Image (spheres, helix red, strand yellow):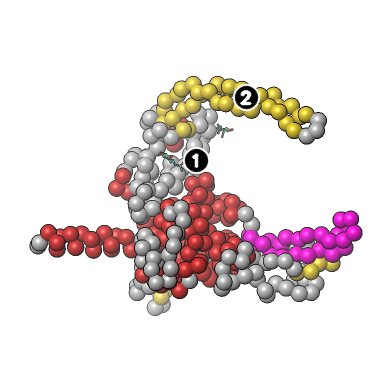
Amino acid sequence: MTPDCVLKSLLMIILALFSANASNWLYLAKLSSLGSITEEEGCERLKGLIQRQVQVCRASVEVMDSVRRGAQLAIQECQHQFRHRRWNCSTLDTPPLFGRVASQGTREAAFVYAVSAASLAYSVTRACSSGELERCGCDRSVQGGAGTEGEDGVHQGPRFQWAGCSDNVAYGVAFSASFADVRERSRRSAAGRALMNLHNNEAGRNAVLSLMRVECKCHGVSGSCEVRTCWRAMPPFRAVGVLLKEKFDGATEVEPRRIGSARALVPRNPQFKPHTPEDLVYLEPSLDFCERDAGSGVLGTEGRACNLTSKAVDGCQLLCCGRGFHSRQAQLLERCGCKFHWCCYVRCRQCLRRVEVHTCR
Ligand SMILES: *[C@@H]1O[C@H](CO)[C@@H](O)[C@H](O)[C@H]1NC(C)=O
Ligand SMILES: *[C@@H]1O[C@H](CO)[C@@H](O)[C@H](O)[C@H]1NC(C)=O
């Protein structure tokens, strides 16, 4: 083979590795802005998109900034929910963003898929409500006269009217399904991993849907609340993260099985009750995430701060994988002796507090 040939086949392998990970659109989170991409040019330049996603990009360039913000939201929330765990949702500087962690069939991958499908639906819905997108706006199906929906708390109390901007979550959810699921849907055989990813994507979107709530505002003479106007609103994304973290803790281990002519995921342990569309599922046990393994994108827990008294996974015993830990004194700058001054400000002093910091060996 000529050097050119070798280079070319190397490139093909790299490209194949690249597209083997459907959550690579999350890599858009690394961009501080999309710059000036247009329909004709630029969608190909976005790292991490597969061909079908490039097509979506070309068809609606204006939505891509919500996709980018959705990716950032997913990573932020993942890092928050996993901040006390051995794998803390750290990202790499080159795709795939989570190394091999998110491309194996583990619980962690389940969470990453679910939270990113959810954040994509969330971010696009937000953009609809804020009038940023031409193709969608507020949910017009929630409009008009006094509601007879029988929603908790809404049909009681004062008269109310649907008004204001209801979040168009149906649009966001549909967009998320069309964008985040394309890779899995384009696989011919419903391999276990494709089924797993699709299920977890759906579970993520279901988390957003299940947390939709009704928000209201009172109108009337001096706050008498004679009439209320209400609209449907999404929860703060933190609530979605909390719910999905609970689903992560209770995730079901499954295996693909042939049922008739189709394949489906069933619990590996037949004693367990079947998972619901809201639950997360996974195919293989996780790594222990103890040691650094650059090839897999695992940073290991050396140097991580641990809690001396906790028996949970943030405790020095578990977090440091039994390797032990270093302890040192540190000083913490804090606000203290705060006094309220009439009227109206608070003045504080700054105090140094000695604390002991423990980090894993
Ligand atoms: C995750 O842990 C690594 C060390 O294992 C640390 O370098 C990194 O800053 C942590 N990331 C976050 C987001 O906490
Ligand atoms: C350490 O863990 C204990 C027990 O879980 C908890 O009460 C405490 O707030 C934790 N300390 C820190 C600094 O997080």
Classify residue 4 by image quadrant.
bottom left
Q: Amino acid at mark 1?
A: His
Classify residue 351 by image quadrant.
top right
- Mark earlier in primary sequence (2, 1): 1
Residue 60: x and y, percent?
A: 48, 71
Residue 191: x and y, percent?
A: 36, 68
Q: Which residues are magenta?
A: 210-234
83 with respect to 45 (left or right): right
Q: Amino acid at mark 2?
A: Gln
Dots 2, 1 in contact, CB < 8 A: no
Q: CA distance from mark 2 to mark 1?
A: 28 Å
13 is within the stretch colored magenta: no
The residue located at (78%, 34%) in the rendering is 344
Towards the viewer: 199 or 48: 48
Q: Secondary structure at mark 1?
A: loop
Q: What residue would you read off at disc 1?
A: 84
Does the numbered disc 1 mark a residue whose Cβ is under 8 Å from ligand 2? no
- Give the number of the mark in front: 2 or 1: 2
Say if 211 sits above or below 356 in the image. Answer: below
Q: Residue furthest left?
A: 1
Q: Which quarter of the rendered picture does the N terminus lie within? A: bottom left
212 is within the stretch colored magenta: yes
Q: Residue furthest bottom?
A: 261
Q: Which quarter of the rendered picture does the C terminus lie within? A: top left
Q: What residue would you read off at disc 2?
A: 350
The residue located at (78%, 65%) in the rendering is 229
28 with respect to 223 (left or right): left
